[in-house]
Amino acid sequence: MTRLPECFRYFPAWVDAPDQLFAELVDGLDWEQKDITIAGRTTPTPRLTCWMGDAAYTYSGVRNEPRPLPPVLARLQDRISAESGAAYNSCLANLYRDGSDSIGYHSDNERELGDRPTIASVSLGSRRTFHVKQAASGQRWAFELGEGDLLIMAGDSQSGYRHSVPKTVRPVGPRLNLTFRQFFA
Ligand SMILES: O=C(O)CCC(=O)C(=O)O
Ligand SMILES: [Mn+2]
């Protein structure tokens, strides 16, 4: 694979005791499966989600009510701020229960995230393939994220690229992803 664009910074196995954190969050977060409406079609989100932050967050027609960050994630957020030099005030958790859960190609470019947001993504549990595609050239990258990896997406990562975690027929265990974001209400 060619080197990732500079606006994506990858820190393998960055989280301490990732299996313990994974188990704690799978059990402890308030998971929901919301309906999303895209292009007039309503379907259940193909994964479980939990939004944590000070403000409500609306995307794809889904309104997520504010909910506090548990202390374990507040501590992780502080460590990631120190590593990335960016501030965060919210976190979206996704739980991919098996290979039929997924997230389609998108950019995290909602107005409330501001221009050129820095988004910090932590992946726990099983590894899944994360795809990045450059909008202008169509160039693609694919790499595995799980087991405590950290990916910092900054600069043009949302304005110039899209990302996804596609479904897979490979037998895979559950994977949990956390994206820390700075949200301007
Ligand atoms: O699960 C992942 O690695 C990506 C999640 C994501 O892109 C999102 O929640 O916006
Ligand atoms: Mn995303």
Image (cartoon, rainbow, N blue to C red):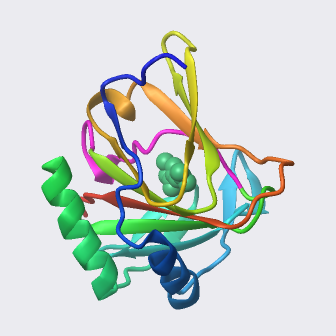
Q: Is residue 49 above or below residue 183?
A: below
Q: Locate residue 78: give its quadrant.
A: bottom left
In percent of the image, x 68 and y 74: which residue is there? 33
Residue 152 seen in render? yes
**What is the x, y in percent for residue 180?**
34, 60
In percent of the image, x 54 and y 87: which residue is there? 30
Q: Is residue 106 magenta?
A: yes
- 105 or 173: which is nearer to us? 173
Which quadrant holds the C terminus? bottom left
Q: Is residue 129 left or right of residue 154?
A: right
Q: Is residue 73 above or below residue 86?
A: below
Q: Is residue 26 magenta?
A: no
Q: Over which residues does the magenta segment extend?
A: 102-117
Residue 105 seen in render? no
Q: Is residue 34 left or right of residue 163?
A: right
**What is the x, y in percent for residue 19?**
51, 74
In percent of the image, x 25 and y 77: which residue is there? 74
Q: Locate residue 131: give its quadrant.
A: top right
- Extreme-bottom residue of the structure: 28
Q: Is residue 65 left or right of residue 26?
A: left
**What is the x, y in percent for residue 155?**
26, 32
**What is the x, y in percent for residue 48?**
64, 71
Q: Is residue 10 above or below residue 121?
A: above
Which quadrant holds the N terminus? top right
Please state the total of marks drawn on the protein image.
Answer: 0
- 44 or 151: which is nearer to us? 151
- Extreme-top residue of the structure: 137
